[in-house]
Image (cartoon, rainbow, N blue to C red):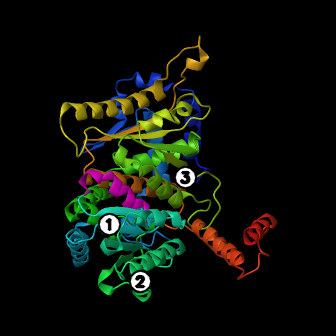
């Protein structure tokens, strides 16, 4: 992204003009219902409530060309080493390809999942953190209406309370523990794994463990039986890994058929991303919107509001996906950026969110763009009028919030009841939250993350910012245990460690 170009300067000038526009006035133009709504099958992306006009969209497309976006996308699909800092190709899309679904590896994973589903196992504990936890936990929640296997528990935090509370209602004799770690060395995960192994052994079920990792030799050395180690390519980044063997707990939960449909939905979005013209390409359009809102309109955050309770973990998953991928201050070549990158991602499920922080979204001093997402029909519940009516109320609330934020409502006589409007949102809808639809939606956001990263010129596939905190934690732990001095720590940190050791 070059900030010293005519295209960039033109977009800056356009943003100045657009900030003076009224979204309500833009929405009075009936053609926006056609010109700013894109569709892929039943997936509908409505940008009519964003500060966009045709001239801005045309200039954003020109901006994409100036950034070499098409070549970067081609390099991604060609298997080039677009993860330049680690010298790796990015291969998570191969994990949902037809070839992988037909592979012996996938057949073995499916067979193991089915054997667990058909066995005496009553509880499955998945121990992982980051992408080894957020992705599969989010999908398990999204497809809860299809759950038909053992009870599933996700444990990520090194806080022993997390594992303790998960194990409290489990019987070691009927519990399987899955340890999911790309390197099989992640401190939090391996500490929890050791505690779980001791708990199983004490209950007479030693070895009731499986591993998902890109380091199978390390897992075997740790003590996992070879026929229970499921590996994946190290080119699969953690936050992009739910499609791989990392999805094993999901497969155990909902079955191989539903998991396959999840992959097929994601693969459909892959094909669209690779082949659709950029003027019709959903990830490209939404990626350009990310840059427009962040760098030209000046919005530092993005709210993710799924009007589907089963998608309540999507904001947390997307928070990791976008902020770990694009939360960078240097370009892929190492040069320092002179512009902002990823917005702060946050959010919660509707309609509950309306009764917590939506006050600030409607009348607060900051403008926060939103992605409001909603399935138009319910899934996995009775079809009688009562359930259907409640879902229609849910959909009505999603649409109403988008309208209210954009249009506002004047009441200058009572300023505390005045709503200025002008709060942009994207309304994303689809028919029902089937595994296929969920996979397609998640892959869309993956590609939006990649597109915006390409436009910003950052490497969306490394996460060196995670490493410093890990290293410092090891230093503090060594000082706390007396194995090392606290000389390298700040005086306040050293004082706290001394206080802890005294007590």
Residue 267, horizontal then vertical, whole percent: 28, 60
Please name the residue shown 37% across and 35% down the image: 36
**Picture layout, residue 224 above or below residue 2:** below
On screen, residue 77 versus residue 475, left or right, reads left
Callouts 2 and 3 close, C-beta under 8 Å: no
**According to the image, label 3 marks what residue?**
342
**According to the image, label 2 marks what residue?**
219
Residue 209, horizontal then vertical, whole percent: 36, 78
Q: Nearer the viewer, residue 379 or 496?
A: 496
**Neighbour tally class for label 2: few under 14, some 14-19, many 20 plus, Cα within 10 Å:** many
Residue 466, horizontal then vertical, whole percent: 58, 67
Mark closer to the observer (3, 1)? 1
Q: Which residues are magenta?
A: 133-147
Q: Tell me which label, 3 or 1, sits earlier in the chain.
A: 1
**Neighbour tally class for label 3: few under 14, some 14-19, many 20 plus, Cα within 10 Å:** many
**Picture layout, residue 336 above or below residue 339:** below
Dominant SS of magenta comes to helix
Residue 388 magenta-drawn?
no
Residue 138 magenta-drawn?
yes
Q: Tell me which label, 2 or 1, sits earlier in the chain.
A: 1
Residue 243: image quadrant is bottom left
Please name the residue shown 48% across and 33% down the image: 355
**Picture layout, residue 493 above or below residue 485:** above
Q: Secondary structure at mark 2?
A: helix
Q: Nearer the viewer, residue 386 or 198?
A: 198
Q: Quadrant of the C terminus?
A: bottom right
Please name the residue shown 22% across and 72% down the image: 119
**Picture layout, residue 10 above or below residue 29:** below
**According to the image, label 1 marks what residue?**
123
């Amino acid at each position: 992204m070059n900030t010293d170009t005519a295209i960039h300067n033109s977009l800056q000038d356009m943003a100045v003009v657009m900030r003076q526009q009224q979204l309500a006035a833009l929405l009075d133009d009936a053609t926006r219902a056609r010109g700013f709504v894109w569709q892929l099958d039943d997936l509908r992306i409505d940008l009519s409530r964003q500060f966009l006009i045709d001239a801005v969209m045309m200039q954003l497309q020109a901006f994409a060309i100036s950034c070499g976006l098409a070549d970067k996308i081609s390099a991604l699909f060609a298997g080039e080493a677009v993860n330049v800092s680690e010298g790796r190709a990015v291969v998570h899309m191969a994990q949902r390809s037809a070839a992988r679904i037909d592979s012996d590896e996938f057949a073995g994973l499916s067979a193991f999942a089915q054997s667990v589903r058909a066995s005496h196992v009553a509880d499955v504990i998945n121990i992982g953190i980051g992408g080894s936890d957020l992705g599969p936990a989010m999908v398990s929640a999204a497809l809860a209406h299809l759950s038909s296997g053992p009870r599933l528990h996700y444990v990520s935090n090194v806080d022993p309370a997390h594992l303790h509370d998960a194990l409290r209602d489990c019987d070691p004799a009927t519990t399987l523990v899955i340890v999911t770690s790309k390197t099989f060395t992640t401190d939090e995960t391996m500490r929890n794994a050791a505690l779980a192994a001791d708990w199983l052994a004490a209950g007479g079920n030693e070895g009731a463990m499986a591993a998902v990792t890109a380091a199978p030799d390390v897992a075997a050395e740790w003590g996992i039986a070879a026929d229970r180690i499921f590996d994946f390519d190290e080119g699969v980044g953690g936050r992009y890994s739910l499609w791989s063997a990392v999805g094993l707990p999901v497969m155990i939960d909902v079955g191989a058929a539903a998991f396959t449909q999840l992959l097929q939905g994601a693969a459909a979005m892959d094909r669209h991303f690779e082949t659709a013209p950029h003027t019709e390409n959903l990830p490209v359009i939404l990626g350009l919107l990310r840059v427009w809102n962040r760098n030209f309109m000046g919005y530092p955050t993005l709210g993710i509001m799924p009007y589907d309770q089963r998608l309540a973990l999507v904001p947390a998953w997307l928070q990791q996906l976008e902020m770990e991928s694009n939360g960078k201050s240097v370009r892929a070549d190492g040069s320092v950026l002179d512009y902002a990158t990823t917005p702060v991602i946050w959010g919660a499920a509707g309609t509950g969110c309306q009764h917590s922080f939506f006050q600030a979204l409607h009348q607060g001093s900051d403008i926060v763009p939103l992605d409001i997402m909603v399935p138009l029909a319910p899934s996995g519940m009775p079809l009688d009028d009562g359930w259907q009516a409640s879902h229609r109320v849910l959909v009505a609330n999603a649409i109403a919030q988008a309208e209210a934020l954009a249009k506002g409502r004047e009441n200058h006589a009572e300023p505390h009841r005045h709503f200025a409007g002008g709060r942009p949102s994207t309304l994303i809808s689809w028919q029902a939250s089937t595994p296929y639809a969920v996979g397609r939606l998640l892959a869309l956001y993956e590609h939006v993350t990649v597109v915006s990263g390409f436009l910003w010129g950052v490497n969306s596939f490394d996460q060196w910012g995670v490493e410093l905190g890990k290293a410092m934690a090891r230093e503090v732990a060594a000082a706390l245990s007396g194995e090392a001095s606290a000389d390298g720590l700040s005086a306040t940190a050293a004082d706290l460690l001394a206080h802890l050791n005294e007590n």
